[in-house]
Image: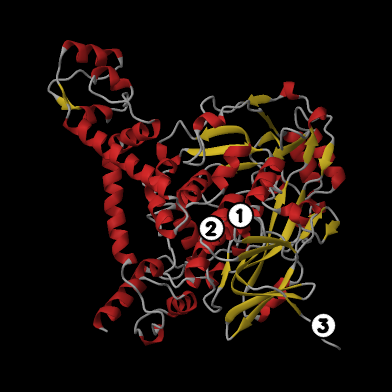
Amino acid sequence: MEEKKLYYYESYDVAVIGAGHAGCEAALACARLGLNTIMFTVSMDSIALMPCNPNIGGTSKGHLVREIDALGGEMGKNIDKTYIQSKMLNVSKGPAVHSLRAQADKQDYTHEMRKTVENQPNLCVKQGEICEILVDNMCVTGVRTYSNAVYPCKAAIICTGTYLKARCIYGDVSHYTGPNGLPAANHLTECLKSLGIEMYRFKTGTPARIDKRSIDFSKMEEQFGDEKVVPFSFETDRASLNREQVSCWLTYTNEETHEIIRGNIDRSPLYSGAIEGTGPRYCPSIEDKVMKFPDKERHQVFIEPEGNYTNEMYISGMSSSLPEDVQYRMYRSVPGLENAKIVRNAYAIEYDCINPMQLKPSLEFKTISGLFSAGQMNGSSGYEEAAAQGLIAGINAARKLTGKEPVILDRSQAYIGVLIDDLVTKETHEPYRMMTSRAEYRLLLRQDNADLRLTKIGYEVGLISEERYQKLLEKEQLIAEETERLKNKMLGGSAKVQEFLTEHGSVPLRTAISMADMIMRPELNYDMLAELDPERKPLPEDVREQVEIELKYSGYIERQQRQVDQFKKTEGRKIPAEFDYDAVPSLRIEARQKLKQIRPENIGQASRISGVSPADISVLLVYMKQN
């Protein structure tokens, strides 16, 4: 058979494969760091597409978006421009788990991000399917499209999302397409396998979209946004967020719904064996919820608008792959949806992804120099997890090509550090979702202090402007000065003070205490104490927030900081890249196999590998000390 002719085009520093949330962040990072970058997409209409839920943020995911912004990424700015409802979650709990979530106008979100990437200097966007990554001596040299166009490059970042050999399924209907009926990427998998990359088959799902005009909202509970809107981006002017918000709605499934599902479970591809991929544990389909939790009498269903200029409503909590006729009966059994008209059927989607343990913490493949991977390609789920990985992969691809050390955030620095460490260290046999419970130092990794933790790193990388960096330094100074002032300002038991304490249900003073100690009382806060503090200067809201949190939770924060100090010691014990684990006596076979497979960079990472016990770590430490 005659070989097809290859056509060579202009060369680039970096090629980004995919233009979803990971691809956009990766491409923008590379271009903003001065690298000539090209981003490929199977369809220009899929740039920053939101094929599933119409929101950004949420529990723990809001932390990721704030961290992306603190490092110089784009997601936070984009949702601030395009939100239609904003809400701070978990406000009844401590600040460590407060998480911002915003409903997005899906079309506006995509259009705004497309405008950003298309107008970014050093960045070219190209519609085309990449079918091969060209490698010479296990180093990336270029990429080839399905049309045999070759673009030489020095690094490539795979951000294929759920498009790789994608298959959408509901009932006995099966389409080899990407989400929302867009083209799938069908040809890259074989290339990756030929390069020795281990692949997984995962699946996720999405619920139906229903015509707003067919919904009876009088049978549902209205869900409003917050009156005081908090931005995702630390650069967004809060005044610009004052706009009219739309409502979401809450309803519930019932026994009739569950009976319809149970009676047709044999027609679900999830249970008939038609779906091969492993689904997400923490975002199950309604079939899974009903079958796995038979004691539950009802499940929450949120009705969420997809935008200002569409009647499509997203039925959150009822993703499904049941046949179309069953979907109609199932949705119409829910209060308020009795006359529902389905605009888009619910479906499951299968796709190829990699075993992320093949990656370094920099998100570069261990065996192929210059090849990086980010997003759902790495076995994660969610827009926010994808964007966070895309940003780090983009930063590290740029740093590799400019001869700099990679940026690796550890578990004590950021949720992004937890996310990537979990992916590259722990075995993931299902789509990974970020949760606050995964972050052991979450009291330090709050969303409110993401800029204080990470903006200096973003500045050193080159993604944060001098002006923004100077504002951060000023903020740090104001926080430090005010905290110190409050620790030194004493309050005595004057009549005014005692009266104030009685009015606020606080114990009167027997001896003088500092203002800082007063703030630590659970019933009092920084702003309430203003009337007892005439010397107080007006400070920005974000400064006041940090001062109060740092003082009120100082005991817990100090204790967690001591834990971090211990953690840093193990992270600091580096393991040589070519360490011979076979030479370590008394190391268990399973531990030896896992350590050789993953090649941890330090003792801390080694200790988190599944199958490596504390006893194995002790043996390893003794051997390293002796040798």
Which amino acid does the dot numbered 3 rest on?
A: Lys
Residue tagged 3: 4
Which percent across, then down, holds residue 562?
Answer: 26, 52
Q: Is residue 469 above or below residue 393?
A: above
| CA distance for labels 3 and 1 | 34 Å
Residue 292, above or below 521: below
The earlier-in-sequence mark between 3 and 1 is: 3
The answer, for residue 284, to whether it is visible in the render is: no
Q: CA distance from mark 2 to mark 1?
A: 8 Å
Q: Earlier in the sequence, mark 2 or mark 1?
A: 2
Give me the disc on residue 32: 2
Which part of the image, by quadrant, shows the N terminus?
A: bottom right
Q: Position of residue 25 (x, y in %)?
A: 58, 56
Badge 3: how crowded within 10 Å, few (<14), some, or many (20+)? few
Secondary structure category for the residue under label 2? helix
Three-letter code for the amino acid on which mark 1 is drawn: Gln
Residue sitting farthest toward the left: 511
Colour style of the rendered protein structure: secondary structure
Place residue 609 in its image quadrant: bottom left
- The label on residue 198 is none
Q: Point out the tag, 2 or 3, that comes first from the N-terminus.
A: 3
Q: Residue at x 17, y 20 (%)?
A: 509
Tag 1 residue:
120
